[in-house]
Amino acid sequence: MARLEGCVSGADVLVVQGGINDIAQGRSVDDAAANLVAMVRRGKEFGLRVVIVDLLPWNNGWPDAEPKIRRLNALIAELARAEGIALLPFHDTLEDPDHPGRMHAEWTSDGDHPSVVGYRRLGEVAARLADYSS
């Protein structure tokens, strides 16, 4: 949130993704959601097309962080609807159907971040949105 203004110079699109560090650091889900709302609205004030991304599954935070991630993702989906912006479903894209709340082992490099294969999957989701929006 603090770096937003410095990051948008020359941009056409703002992709807002955040909240997992708030959860990891023990901050409240409501505070994380409020920061995301503020970033989305600020991006719109700058005249940018704004897209929001939901939180990824977090293998190393599972199971304790899972309810908070699900709650924040629900708030992110609600924000996308309320603001009329696209939501990139990164959580569901990398969630292992055999291990809900966690990324498939092939799609994470360290249990925290996507692997190259995981990032490729996320890129495909973003590309579909870009193709749809063109």
Image (cartoon, grey):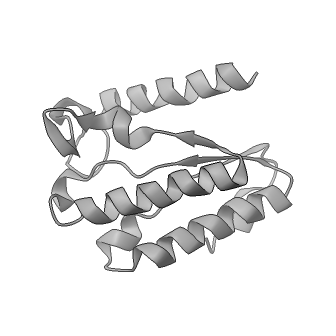
Position of residue 119 measured from the top left corner of the image (x, y, whole percent): 39, 33
Residue occupying the point 84% across, 58% down: 46
Residue occupying the point 16% across, 58% down: 62
Say if 12 sits above or below 127 in the image. below
Residue occupying the point 84% across, 61% down: 45
Position of residue 132 measured from the top left corner of the image (x, y, whole percent): 67, 21
Say if 97 sits above or below 32 in the image. above
In the rendered structure, the answer to whether residue 119 lies left or right of residue 44 reads left
Q: Does any portion of residue 20 appear in the rendered image?
A: yes
Position of residue 5 measured from the top left corner of the image (x, y, whole percent): 74, 66
Q: Quadrant of residue 102?
A: top left
Position of residue 104 measured from the top left corner of the image (x, y, whole percent): 20, 34
In the rendered structure, the answer to whether residue 126 lies left or right of residue 89 reads right
Q: Quadrant of residue 9?
A: bottom right
Say if 74 sits above or below 65 in the image. above
Say if 97 sits above or below 48 in the image. above
- Of 42 and 99, nearer the camera is 99
Q: Tell me the quadrant of the picture where the C terminus can be found.
A: top right
Residue occupying the point 52% across, 51% down: 77
**Count of numbered tags:** 0
Q: Does any portion of residue 17 appear in the rendered image?
A: no
